[in-house]
Image (cartoon, coloured by chain):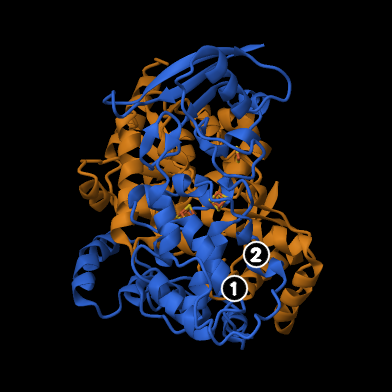
Chain colours: A orange, B blue
């Protein structure tokens, strides 16, 4: 199973622990990657607000690079996945648009012919690695933990661009949470918005959204949260204290990136997963994992 | 087959809070949720209150929350809902005042629609025969809206702040920005209102409105077009516009987004806001989360720059 890894900006910038933890786990799951080191930002839906065709060209440029390697793309960011998945569908279904965008790529000697597929790590683990293989790699079941999945918007909607989970009833994150032996927490906010796109300019609205989701998860019994999107992670982790103040709650809810959760269950040391880079303390999670390790050594389940 | 229908009921004049009631009904092939509601009202409980008229997804009056998502009752198949969710749970639209049971007060929805002046602006006295109507396609389907309110109920920004004009009203506003019969001056006046707080920049681009709209209006896409029109008309000082322009500039310069510089682009030289974001910036720095602002650009950045700085045709949409 080989993919062209599209890192995106966040994993190369403000959430380096996402890149680190991804690299720490994929080999064990049988996923090989070649990193697209010359790839640009996907536009995050923001560039497209000013320049839709320019934004499509950024995605097409990345697709052309992957096509050159003969590989499909693996993303590790829900937002990149949504933006690039949508761009790919449009380019594949509109030959005139594809031709126009290819004219923008021509000076670099690149051309996209529409052969690449774009898949998020979450989907690759669920559908291609499979639960059998994942369970073989799980060394410590996270059995005491109640884990709240937080999907984020772009990995679910619009479903006709994304096409993996049912946006009204997604199950992929819950499947992985169960595979590591933990209990998924059910709460309405799991499919809602983290507020990140407007957190700088409309802080109050964004923090209300963010805090409401976190509080709901906490009230439903979550010990931690896990997300497949680093932009959600920034909102949920970096801004958590402020979000808590906005909704009058002490949250202190550790938020992990998807590969960090998988890594812990595979027995990867927390430092190798970049766990020390979070703003909200992840100590309770690490302690729970350590306790399970000791129990296992002592021969208890 | 007899199925249980869980209906949220609430009479604000008599009760303090809403409660759920379950009705069992034998359903037949091809039945919609609205068919079932009508039969429940006729055969089991005449007090159940809901709105409907056309029964065929035209009038927009039967939007409600079915199994947690906003849908038209008259267009929602019971069989499909049962297969998808294993239950039929019917509640009123969210974040709108409840009149009774499934009927919500749409007054606020209509006043927001009025607030975007949903008619052609400018001086019509000088119009000697209006120009021929443009190709309707130019409206990108916003004129297909049946004003059902599903998008507003699903909107995550509206949930956090009910002052937000919301997806339906903004999609309606776009219809006039896209109409070539309205003068440039009138459009500029329109955009000056829409760029204010509670307007186009309050949308968080969560895609809920796009997902739930029964008529494929794609309100978020209309909001994005309004944002572009506002920027092109010179409204570039809001935080939202600065975000878009600053983001594009940074990508053109480095090839990737540099989150160390992004907040400064949005906040600008606004000292109180700067003072608010600084402590967080320092905590991020200590955790190794602030990317080096002097990080070298990606390989081939000149091509990214050429793409993003090419001359474009311009125009409002
Ligand atoms: S995309 Fe914007 S308008 Fe649409 S539901 Fe989300 S926040 Fe509301
Ligand atoms: S945009 Fe769609 S969901 Fe919103 S009111 Fe119009 S028809 Fe209903
Ligand atoms: S009854 Fe008219 S839209 Fe459903």
Question: Mark 2 or mark 1: which comes first in sequence?
Answer: 2
* As drawn, A160 above or below A223: below
Q: Position of residue B96 (x, y in %)?
A: 38, 42
Q: How many discs appear?
A: 2
For label 2, being within 8 Å of ligand 2 is answered no
Q: Position of residue B306 (x, y in %)?
A: 61, 85
* As drawn, A118 above or below B122: above
Residue at figure coordinates x 20%, y 49% from the top left: A245
Secondary-structure class at tag 2:
loop
Left or right of A99? Residue A244 is: left
Q: CA distance from mark 2 to mark 1?
A: 9 Å
Q: Position of residue A38 (x, y in %)?
A: 60, 71
Task: Determine which residue is flagged by label 1.
Answer: B178
| Ligand 3 falls in quadrant | top right
- The mark found on residue B82 in the picture is none
How many C-alpha atoms fall within 10 Å of the one at disc 2: few (<14), some, or many (≥20)?
some
Task: Determine which residue is flagged by label 2.
Answer: B140
Left or right of B204? Residue A167 is: right
Secondary-structure class at tag 1:
loop
Residue at figure coordinates x 50%, y 76% from the top left: B121
For label 1, being within 8 Å of ligand 2 is answered no
B287, B108: nearer the viewer: B108
A265, A6: nearer the viewer: A6
Q: Which image quarter: residue B71?
A: top right
How many C-alpha atoms fall within 10 Å of the one at disc 1: few (<14), some, or many (≥20)?
many
Residue at figure coordinates x 52%, y 80% from the top left: B252
Question: Image quadrant for the C terminus of chain A?
Answer: top left
Report the chain holding disc 2. Answer: B
Callouts 2 and 1 close, C-beta under 8 Å: yes
């Amino acid at each position: 199973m080989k993919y062209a890894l599209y890192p995106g900006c966040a994993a190369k910038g403000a959430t380096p622990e996402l890149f680190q933890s991804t690299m720490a786990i994929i080999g064990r799951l049988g996923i090989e990657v070649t990193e697209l080191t010359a790839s640009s930002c996907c536009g995050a839906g923001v560039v497209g607000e000013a320049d839709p065709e320019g934004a499509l060209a950024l995605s097409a440029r990345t697709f052309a690079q992957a096509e050159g390697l003969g590989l499909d793309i693996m993303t590790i960011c829900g937002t990149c996945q949504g933006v690039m998945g949508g761009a790919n569908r449009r380019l594949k279904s509109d030959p005139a648009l594809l031709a126009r965008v290819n004219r923008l790529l021509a000076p670099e000697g690149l051309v996209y012919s529409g052969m690449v597929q774009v898949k998020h790590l979450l989907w690759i683990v669920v559908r291609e690695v499979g639960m059998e293989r994942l369970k073989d790699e799980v060394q410590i079941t996270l059995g005491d933990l109640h884990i709240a999945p937080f999907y984020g918007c772009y990995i679910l909607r619009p479903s006709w661009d994304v096409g993996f989970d049912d946006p009204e009833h997604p199950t992929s994150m819950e499947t992985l949470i169960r595979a590591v032996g933990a209990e998924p927490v059910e709460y309405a906010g799991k499919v809602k918005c983290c507020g990140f796109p407007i957190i700088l300019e409309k802080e109050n609205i964004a923090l209300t959204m963010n805090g409401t989701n976190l509080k709901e998860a906490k009230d439903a019994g979550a010990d931690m949260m896990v997300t497949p999107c680093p932009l959600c992670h920034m909102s949920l982790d970096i801004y958590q204290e402020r979000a808590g103040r906005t909704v009058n709650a002490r949250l202190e809810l550790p938020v992990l990136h998807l590969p960090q959760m998988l890594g812990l269950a595979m027995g990867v040391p927390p430092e190798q997963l970049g766990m020390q880079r979070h703003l909200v303390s992840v100590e309770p999670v690490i302690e729970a994992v350590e306790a399970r390790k000791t129990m296992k050594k002592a021969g208890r389940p | 087959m007899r199925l249980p229908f869980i209906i949220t009921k609430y009479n604000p004049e008599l009760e303090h809070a809403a409660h759920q009631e379950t009705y069992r009904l034998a359903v037949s092939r091809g039945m919609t949720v609205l068919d079932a509601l009508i039969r429940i009202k006729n055969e089991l409980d005449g007090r159940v209150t809901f709105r409907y008229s056309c029964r065929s997804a035209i009038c927009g009056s039967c939007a409600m929350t079915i199994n947690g998502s906003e849908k038209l009752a008259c267009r929602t198949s019971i069989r499909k809902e049962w297969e998808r969710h294993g239950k039929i749970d019917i509640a009123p639209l969210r974040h709108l005042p409840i009149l009774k049971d499934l009927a919500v007060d749409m007054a606020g929805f209509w006043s927001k629609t009025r607030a975007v002046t949903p008619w052609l602006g400018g001086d019509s006295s000088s119009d000697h025969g209006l120009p021929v109507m443009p190709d309707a396609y130019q409206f990108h389907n916003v004129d297909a809206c049946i004003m059902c309110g599903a998008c507003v109920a699903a909107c995550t920004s509206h949930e956090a702040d009910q002052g937000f004009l919301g997806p339906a009203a903004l999609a309606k506003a776009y219809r006039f920005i896209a109409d070539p019969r309205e003068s440039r001056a009138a459009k500029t006046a329109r955009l000056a209102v829409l760029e204010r707080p509670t307007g186009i920049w309050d949308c968080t681009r969560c895609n809920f409105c796009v997902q739930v709209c029964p008529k494929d209006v794609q309100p978020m896409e209309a909001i994005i077009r309004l944002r572009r029109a506002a920027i092109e008309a010179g409204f570039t000082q809001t935080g939202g516009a600065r975000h878009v322009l600053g983001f594009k500039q940074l990508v053109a310069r480095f090839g990737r987004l540099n989150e160390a510089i992004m907040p400064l682009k949005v906040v600008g030289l606004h000292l109180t806001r700067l003072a608010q974001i600084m402590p967080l910036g320092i905590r991020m720095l200590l955790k190794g989360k602030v990317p080096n602002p002097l990080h070298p650009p990606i390989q081939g950045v000149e091509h990214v720059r050429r793409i993003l700085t090419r001359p474009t045709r311009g125009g409002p949409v």
